[in-house]
Image (tube, grey):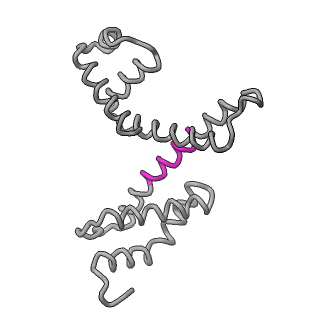
Amino acid sequence: MRAGEPPFQREIHHLYSDHHGWLSGWLRKKLGNSFDAADIAHDTFLRLLTSRSSSGFGSEPRALLAHIAKGLLIDHWRHQEVERAYLDAIAHLPEQHVPSPETRLLVLEALQRIDAMLHALPSKTREIFLLAQFDGLGYGEIAQRLDTSLITVKRHMRKAFIACMAAA
């Protein structure tokens, strides 16, 4: 720590010094391995650094760290779930149709972006979008099934399409 260091950086330094070991251990228990725990602990402090909050970290810094880390854990587990589903799907392909490692990585990255986009949508928008795109229902059918107006379905679909374009 340097003498001319801004207060925010000093706070982060103290927070890291005081709580990094605890956070890493807490994550290790949740994840069952040190490598992912170290990555998520690092990302937790990185989130704090990029937030640039000048309001301090409150009287319960561990609660703040745990809150941030829980969100990152959910993302981590969701990414693992997407990866596992994709790998299960391609495991049944004939060898000549199995994608190359590079293609698998590109597909996984795209699937994870799609998953993140879908989870960022409001639940009603996501439901309507999935009914249209995966169940093949028309807007009128969706409106009837969900007992809502056609214009409401169109608004939700427009919101979902905008999110798709932003994720692309």
Main secondary structure of the magenta stretch: helix
x then y, percent, for residue 46: 41, 64
| Relative height, residue 48 to residue 108 (above, below) | below
Quarter that holds the N terminus: bottom left
Tell me, yes or no, whether the highlighted magenta stretch contains residue 78: yes
Relative side of 32 to 45, left or right: right
Residue 151: name its quadrant.
top left
Quarter that holds the C terminus: top left
Please name the residue shown 36% across and 67% down the image. 49
Q: Please tell me how many numbered marks the rendered image carries.
A: 0
Please name the residue shown 55% across and 61% down the image. 37
Residue 9: name its quadrant.
bottom left
Residue at the farthest bottom position: 3
Relative side of 34 to 157, left or right: right
Relative side of 160 to 78, left or right: left
Please name the residue shown 37% across and 24% down the image. 129
Near-viewer residue (112 or 166): 166
| Relative height, residue 142 to residue 46 (above, below) | above
x then y, percent, for residue 86: 61, 34
| Relative height, residue 148 to residue 53 (above, below) | above
x then y, percent, for residue 134: 47, 20
| Relative height, residue 83 to residue 19 (above, below) | above
Residue 162: name its quadrant.
top left
x then y, percent, for residue 163: 34, 35
Tell me, yes or no, whether the highlighted magenta stretch contains residue 110: no
Relative side of 166 to 34, left or right: left
Please name the residue shown 55% across and 38% down the image. 82
Which region shows up in magenta?
Answer: 70-82
